[in-house]
Image (cartoon, rainbow, N blue to C red):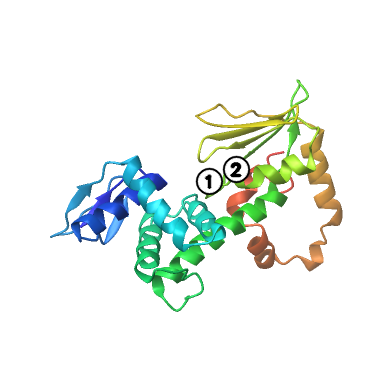
Amino acid sequence: MIYLIDGTMDGIFTAVFNSYLTKKFPSALTDGEIQLEIGEELVEVTTDLDKAQRVFNKLYKILPKRETDRIFTAIKSGDFAKFTVIFNYIVKTIDAGKNIYDKLSDKDVFNFDRLVSRVLLEAHRFKGFIRFSQAENGVYYAKYFPDSDINTLILPHFVNRFKSMPFILHDLNHDVVSAHVDGMTKTVREKVIPLDIKDDFAKLFKTYYDSIFIKERANERLMNNYMPKRYHKYLPEKNELL
């Protein structure tokens, strides 16, 4: 049995509640089209906020805040299996009646920990990979294409660094735009046409990169481990189109 949910955290919580209510637990969760195998059944789960709240309250009694925060971090992953991984971890936690974050020998705990770690790693990387350009109105703009939905995770970092600088972070993959203007921040989720700005900042990044790059000591494999190729498109120092 596979649960079809709406892709939200409340949808997962509702699926958990329904599973304990019916005593039937799915083999997987999905939020979209899926090719069913012979004998598999697709069951649609309608999100119920009351049910979701009851599951969250249960977890809140069991887990410290840091661990509940990790669950909400996991949902930001771009991994198609994230709903199943989170569901299994929640069920296992409720069954145990205690925090099991350190039981990494357990497959479900390990998969959940890896899911969270990858989201946090990508967020950490983009704190260094974001490249701002200045628009004509003086606002600084940066577009990027992350695997995970990390805009709200990295926004505080840039707010802290550029407290008086108006800027916009534009996640093209998840259609999320975060703006910081006059000490206030706001995030919206909607499709917005990305700006195409070619300014001196982009040229500066490329000039700096070329000046410190030592061709004879190049190690492409090591470089790509720290700066994966899928991120290069919006890095002016790596974008040969500039």
| Quarter occupied by the C terminus | top right
What kind of residue is marked 1?
Asp
Q: Tag 1: Cα neighbours inside 10 Å, few (<14), some, or many (≥20)?
A: many
* Residue located beneath label 1 in the image: 149
Q: Residue 201, how many percent across, how many down?
A: 80, 37
- Mark sitting on residue 152: 2
Task: Pick out the residue farthest to the right.
Answer: 211
Residue shown at 79% from the left, 32% from the top: 165
| Quarter occupied by the N terminus | bottom left
Residue shown at 33% from the left, 42% from the top: 50
Residue shown at 71% from the left, 46% from the top: 157
| Mark in front: 2 vs 1 | 2
Residue shown at 30% from the left, 51% from the top: 15
Task: Pick out the residue farthest to the top.
Answer: 137
What kind of residue is marked 2?
Thr
Q: Is residue 146 above or below residue 63?
A: above
Callout 2 touching callout 1 (CB < 8 Å) = yes
